Amino acid sequence: MTTSKRQRTSDDQAPGPSSNNAPDPRILARCQAAAQLSATDVKKLEVELARYLLFADKKNIPVKRADIVKHVLKEQPKLLPAVLEGSRRYLKQTFDFSVAEIDYNKTKYYLLKNNVQLPNLQILLRPEHAQRQLALLIVILSFIHMANNSLEETDLWDSLKILGVDRTEAHVEFGDAEKLLNEFVKQMYLEKQKVSTSKDYLSMRPILLLI
Amino acid sequence: MSTLGVEHHMFVQTLAARRIVSEREAQELICKCIDISGRSYSGTVDLQDHVTKINSQLSVLFLEVRKGTCENTGSKYYAFVNCQEDEISKLASNYSAQDFAYFRKMIEQIILSDEGCIHSTDSLTLCNNLGEQKKMSYANAKVLLRGWCNERWLIEDRSSNSFQLGPRAIIELGQYIQSAYGEHVTNCSLCMTVCVYGQRCEDCNTKFHNHCKQRLMSGNLDQVRCPHCKSEWS
């Protein structure tokens, strides 16, 4: 899957200090200057942010920077870069996840990326019904791609109907297909734009590279 | 502090994704992860050893791979549990406040009951009064119950048409049950952990897990006695 050119993604930098969990002294100094936080406080925030990213990843919905500042950093945005670096370390050490940062619509999003590239892992990770949903997603993405990344929703449903997926009927495997499509939009695989009252256009979002 | 290899990362990722697996599944999984990662191990694969390694990294994040036993079947399970209930973990759930209220009521009824289970019809009437969360339809309740059985929070016993606490509830909520319902729950006299569903000796009133008693009695089939008071067990 390729990323759309206008998006920027940045992954972790090279790993910081060794495997011990103490914060990098330069970062610590920055944090402490910013908010008079002790090393223990900083570590606590790093753990909370790591957990926050983990739990959000479980729901498969990217996290907004604003939400991190609100729920984890308690309205102290200056702490984010330093705390994020610590969280990245924990996630990499324990799970081998990296934290990807994505700019979209003037908002910064974060989500977890799996560093383990072995294809068989994907099969282990996903229960069967999730694998089948993934198959549907890939079909939808191909239709959108063939329409030059802008496909009217009604046209998409016409194409899906040929494959036996109907907007109005319950599908034997996917159930409410329209609800599933909206889930994909919520998970930011797809984007829906209203062009006029009756026309919705669907296009791909680069989050898809993380399948 | 030992660092984790690819096989450990794969294993913990899978456990985090699946939340609970049987011991057999866990054993198969770690072997698969070792195979796929290309590592070679001599001798048998020690599942517990790998779990301990992983837990040493998970503990700082207040997460744990915890082992437990199903009260119904006696099978062992490994669950990926969150050890700290905070604002952040509450954001993670896919369930609504109303779903939670119903779940809490269900497990409360099971814990407070004599037999450690709740009849199916009673489980449905529970959703008529969820306090602040008002009422829930029976249809909605049925969907939730099905989901909770799939996730192993509950077990549906078809023969008695009742619900019991599943291995996930026992493993994840064991401490909570102890602290919230202390006076109402007894521990199994053999393994000393919370016993919601089990057998009671009529004479001395001690409680045992079925599987704990089974293991003790496996040798002597002629004289079945209460392990605690030694009186004959009917």
Image: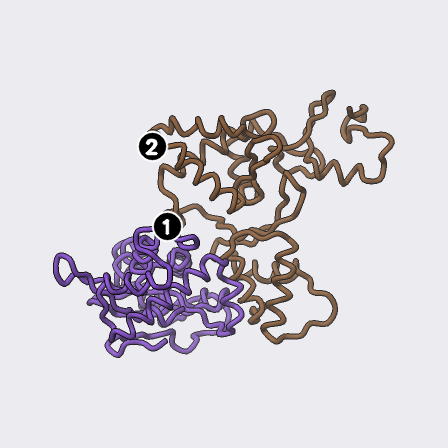
Instruction: In the rendered structure, find residue B9 and report the number of the disc placed on it.
Output: none
Taking the image as shown, residue B162 lies to the left or right of residue B27, namely left
Q: Residue A11, located in which quarter of the rendered image?
A: bottom left
Hey, what amino acid is under mark 1?
Answer: Ala
Hey, what amino acid is under mark 2?
Answer: Gln
For the question of whether residue B157 can be seen, the reply is yes
> What is chain B's hue in the picture?
brown
Q: Secondary structure at mark 2?
A: helix
Q: Position of residue B215 (x, y in %)?
A: 76, 41
Q: Secondary structure at mark 1?
A: loop
In contact (CB < 8 Å): disc 1 and disc 2: no
Q: Position of residue A168 (x, y in %)?
A: 30, 51
Q: Look at the image and tell me in which quarter the N terminus of chain A lies.
A: bottom left
Chain designation of label 2: B
Q: Position of residue A182 (x, y in %)?
A: 30, 56
For the question of whether residue B60 can be seen, the reply is no
Taking the image as shown, residue A82 lies to the left or right of residue A97, namely left
Question: In the rendered image, which residue does mark 2 sit on?
Answer: B133
Residue under the point 59% across and 24% down:
B114
Question: In the rendered image, which residue does mark 1 sit on?
Answer: A170
Taking the image as shown, residue A109 lies to the left or right of residue A135, namely left
In 3D space, how far apart are the residues under numbered discs 1 and 2 (Cα atoms)?
30 Å
* Residue A27 higher or lower than A130, as above or below: below
